[in-house]
Image: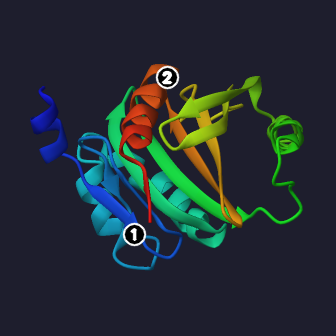
Amino acid sequence: MGAAQSAAASTRVNESKYGFSFTLPPKWEQIPLNGRDISGILDQALKADPAMKGSMTKEVQAAAKNGIKFFAIGPVLDQFASNLNIIVTSSAGYPNNSSYYGIADSQIKINLTEAGFKDLKTSLVHLPFGKEIEATYELPSSLSGVPADGLQLYVKHKSHFEVITFTSHSSSVNQAAAEILEQSWKWG
């Protein structure tokens, strides 16, 4: 598929409250977290595997309660609905100089290890919007029982962090989705 077709099939997301926008990968659908018809939207998004609707409905409802500001799902592959969520949180208490990366990296490793994630790796990455921290890991289990991988980007901007999480059945799906988001991300 050419770049023009790919762009035409994608959705641009604008988050004016936190000052960022990005493009979703083709065939991914944003799931509103504001109480609209989650069930109906999931029906459309999960046409390939309607049996996943119950577990995904619970996951979306939990996301809204846990401070997630954005949630989207991708095509169902191998009985798993790839998903993307973004949490925005305060960066208060973290330094604004180069020591930030070491401190944040240590805290990320502690948090993800305590959550039970396996094969955890963190690294500094140079993205189009700056130097950031990336974490990759294997989830201990998924709702569907299918093994899942995660990729998180920790983006520090002004007085907050955006924790961007991709979860799917494979690291290659996460990487492909992350590249689209990274290349299309804009501040302001």
Taking depth in this image into account, of 110 and 169 the one nearest to the observer is 110
Q: Amino acid at mark 1?
A: Pro
In the picture as drawn, the residue positioned furthest to the front comes out as 97
**Residue 138 appears in the rendering:** no
Spatial CA distance of label 2 from label 1 is 25 Å
Look at label 2 and name its amino acid: Ser
Answer whether residue 171 is visible to the viewer in this image.
yes
Q: Residue at x 46, y 58 (%)?
A: 71
Q: Residue at x 82, y 37 (%)?
A: 105
Query: Nearer the N terminus, badge 2 or badge 1?
Result: 1
- In x, y percent, where is residue 122? 74, 27
Classify residue 176 by image quadrant.
top left
Q: Residue furthest bottom?
A: 35
Q: Mark 2 Cα within 10 Å, few/some/many (few <14, many 20+)?
A: some
Q: Is residue 51 above or below residue 124?
A: below
The spot of residue 103 in percent (x, y) is: 89, 42
Which disc number belongs to residue 170?
2
Taking depth in this image into account, of 51 and 86 the one nearest to the observer is 86
Q: Position of residue 166 (x, y in %)?
A: 52, 40
36 left or right of 137? left
Can you say which quadrant of the picture contains the N terminus? top left
The front one of 36 and 106 is 106
Which numbered tag is attached to residue 32? 1
